[in-house]
Amino acid sequence: DAGVTQSPTHLIKTRGQQVTLRCSPKSGHDTVSWYQQALGQGPQFIFQYYEEEERQRGNFPDRFSGHQFPNYSSELNVNALLLGDSALYLCASSPSGGSSYGYTFGSGTRLTVV
Amino acid sequence: AQKVTQAQTEISVVEKEDVTLDCVYETRDTTYYLFWYKQPPSGELVFLIRRNSFDEQNEISGRYSWNFQKSTSSFNFTITASQVVDSAVYFCALLGGSNYKLTFGKGTLLTVNP
């Protein structure tokens, strides 16, 4: 049973560029959340997608946007990259209505902005 | 607002020692859920335990045990007879009743030396 898969695993981008990160949820899960984890910090919630809509958003600027597809996979897009966007981006999935059971996390995409 | 505090930034022990990781939380929700995750160097967050606010029973799973005390808003995690493989960053997290986002602490880096 495949868990949460994320791609790519590593990425290097230049300031001002745009990036797209991808996530496939665990089988049976239909809700996808994205988190940003800066070095030495805990993950910070970016947003959650359910039924192809953004259900809740954290304290992140509009440069961060997302999408969920009918097969429940999701993309995270970041525009106008800043050096401060360098972080590990984690995707987490959960079954619908089952957020209280916690989330299954992927291994993340490590984004470096130079 | 929800907040999770892990006051211990780093802990270093020798193999076979017992170690306790502290977690203090703040929330106004009467229904909430607490979690512990382990993050090895690979980056993936590995689920360890979930506890809801109505269940204050302590739990033991092998060498792991958890002590939940609502009176002090604490949810501490103890590893008995630590092993080198326990070396990782451990995160405590909170999910508020009507919220979809996990609020994480900053994590505790545990190093178990042989």
Image (tube, rainbow, N blue to C red):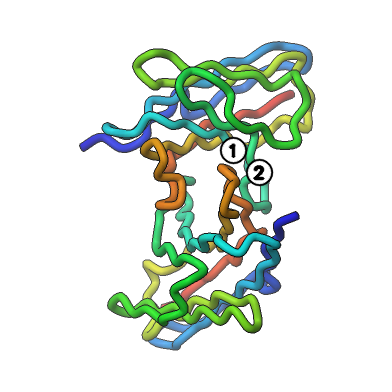
Q: Secondary structure at mark 1?
A: strand
Residue linked to disc 2: A44
Up-down relation of residue A19 to residue B45 (above or below):
above
Question: Could one spot residue B42 in this view of the protein?
Answer: no
Name the residue at 78% across, 32% down: A84
Q: Is residue B108 left or right of residue A27?
A: right
Mark 1: few, some, or many residues within 10 Å (few <14, many ≥20)?
many
Q: Compare marks 1 and 2 and give the one earlier in the sequence.
A: 1
Task: Estimate the x, y position of residue B62 in percent, counting from the top left.
Answer: 28, 78
* Residue sitting at the far left: A1
Question: Could one spot residue B6 in this view of the protein?
Answer: yes
Name the residue at 74% across, 31% down: A60
Task: Estimate the x, y position of residue A76 in percent, counting from the top left.
Answer: 57, 21
Up-down relation of residue A1 to residue B68 (above or below):
above
Location of the N terminus of chain A (image quadrant):
top left
User: In front here: A13 or A72?
Assistant: A72
Name the residue at 38% across, 13% down: A70
Location of the C terminus of chain A (image quadrant):
top right
Q: Amino acid at mark 2?
A: Gln
Q: Are marks 1 and 2 in contact (CB under 8 Å)?
A: yes
Q: Amino acid at mark 1?
A: Tyr
Task: Estimate the x, y position of residue B80 in percent, counting from the top left.
Answer: 39, 84
Query: The numbered mark 1 sits on a residue in which chain?
Result: A
Residue linked to disc 1: A35
User: In front here: A25 or A54?
Assistant: A54
